[in-house]
Image (cartoon, grey):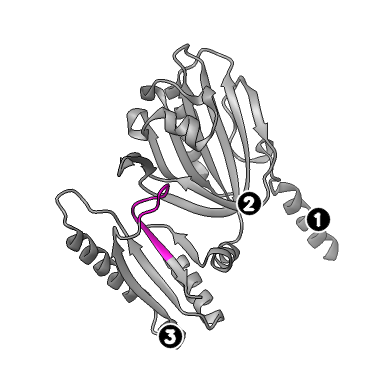
Amino acid sequence: MEDKRLVSALILFLMVPSFGFSQTSIEIFPQSKIVSQDALSSTQRFELITGKVRRINSLLSPESVLVVMGEKQSKMLLSATRRNAEEIYQYYLGQLKTNAEVIFQCSGRDCGPSTYWANKVYQKALLYGPEQYQRYIIARVDTFQPYYLLIYIGQRATGQVYVQHEALFPEALENQMKSALAETYRYVLPWNIDEKLIEQIEKIVADTQSQYILVVHDKMREGESFDQALSRTEEQARTLKKRFGQKETLSRLRFHGAGPISPLRDGPAGRVELIKLK
């Protein structure tokens, strides 16, 4: 009986993917050659683009980002055959239908300026090309070791198609939040907060004696005044509060709407922040 358990454990161990693209469940496009690659990074903070890139107050910025603490590995690939960006894009989307959740995707000019992606996001000039050909996908892949897959496709005027292929392996959510709160006293949450995240916030508040504030930020929408934007985010904060329980420890958690008062220079206009008071 003991031997059977050991064999089962060994099988599971061998099936768990390691930190390398060859072991992830998504295959790269056939006949692609590696132009450059980065080894697995140390654990650090990454902002993953989950919304359209737009010009906000004269600065280009994504509408939303997902902040993740984790380790990232990346490769830039060149298609060795004359395939267009859309064909490669559909190849990856087809694989993501079975074991992944696509968080955001865009194509063409809906992704924003190609220069932003090539120069600001990836710092790789080879990714720059006509905007109508660019494609972007971010998905959460569910395997033994869940990870985020990010793919940006750029087709140059010469017809060459380059693919920036990244896998980010997140640190446990609790560790991410605790690290950020300890270092910067704030943690940027996803715009849509699910029940799992609410439970995690409740646990963090309960485990310390500090005071916390959940702040809802958002820019002014078209035709909206400053006061209307402020009132809207205050109402969103009240709605968020109702989703939390009535535990005594939550008396140390307050909820506020800040409207467009505190924009981020390079971050999303709409966001929810958990702030730890010093």
Task: Please determine whether, in this image, residue 178 is positioned above or below residue 269.
Answer: below
Q: What amino acid is labelled 3 in the image? A: Lys
Which residue is labeled 3 in the image?
A: 247
Nearer-N-terminus badge (1/2): 1
Looking at the image, the residue that sits furthest to the right is 3
Task: Please determine whether, in this image, residue 201 is positioned above or below residue 36.
Answer: below
Residue name at image x 35 percent, y 55 percent: 263
How many circles with numbers are drawn on the protein? 3
Q: Label 3, label 1: how many angstroms apart (C-alpha)? A: 45 Å
Nearer-N-terminus badge (2/3): 2
Q: Label 2, label 3: how many angstroms apart (C-alpha)? A: 33 Å
Q: Answer with left or right where residue 21 lies relative to residue 141.
A: right
Q: How far from the left and from the top, in percent, is residue 4? A: 81, 60
Regarding mark 1 in the picture, which secondary structure is present there?
helix
Looking at the image, the residue that sits furthest to the bottom is 248
Q: Nearer the viewer, residue 203 or 141?
A: 203
Which residue is labeled 2 in the image?
A: 145
Residue name at image x 33 percent, y 29 percent: 109
